[in-house]
Amino acid sequence: MDELVQRGASCLTVLDISAAGLDRAAGRLGSRRAEVSWIEADVTTEWRVPIVDIWHDRALFHFLTERADRAIYRDRVLQGLRPGGSFIVATFGPDGPPKCSGLPTERYSPESLNQELGARFQLKDAIQERHQTPFGTTQEFWYSRFELV
């Protein structure tokens, strides 16, 4: 997000359940923090963002283990992303951990994630990453880009 602000991107919104996390991120921007909309919310509750061209989910979706929560979040993306826009999402892959930070996770291949999201999301690209944790373990991540049709 810091890099996007530095490059002059507009209509940036950051959503996090943690006020402390939002404060830390905003603090990195200094006086430019006002160029970003900050939302403290659980993604499964009521919140709105302006319609955007790109929606980036940095490793949240795999923590939504209840089908109803995933449906709520998918509907928020459908409301906030313009047709033709990109939904970029990082998730644990099929060989990723069943738990992270003590929380259960869902694991996805790009194709199974596309099935979960539904027909309005068309898989365009996917890149696998083997993430090395501070604890010396490796976690399989997939970064997938979908186009909203």
Image (cartoon, grey):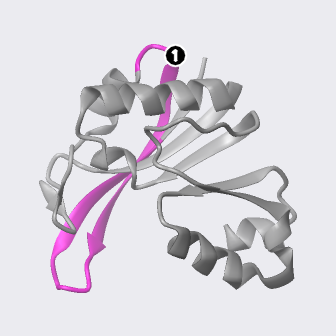
| Residue 54 magenta-highlighted | no
* 147 to 32, vertically: above or below: above
The rendered magenta stretch, by its main secondary structure, is classed as strand
Q: Quadrant of the C terminus?
A: top right
Q: Position of residue 122 (x, y in %)?
A: 50, 23
As drawn, the residue found furthest toward the top would be 119
Secondary structure type for disc 1: loop
Q: Decide which of 10, 148 is in the foreground and name it.
A: 10
Tell me if residue 97 can be seen: no
The residue at the point 46 percent across, 33 percent down is 73
Q: Quadrant of residue 44?
A: top left
Residue denoted by label 1: 120
Q: Position of residue 61 (x, y in %)?
A: 37, 45
The residue at the point 75 percent across, 79 percent down is 29
Q: Decide which of 132, 10 is in the foreground and name it.
A: 10
Q: Quadrant of the N terminus?
A: bottom right
Q: Quadrant of residue 148?
A: top right
User: Counting other residues with Cα less than 10 Å from the Cα at mark 1, is it few (<14), some (14-19), or many (20 or more)?
Assistant: few
Q: Position of residue 88 (x, y in %)?
A: 53, 44
Tell me if residue 139 can be seen: yes
In magenta, the rendered stretch is: 118-144
30 to the left or right of 126: right
Callout 1 amino acid: Arg
* 3 to 47, vertically: above or below: below
The residue at the point 26 percent across, 86 percent down is 134
| Residue 131 magenta-highlighted | yes
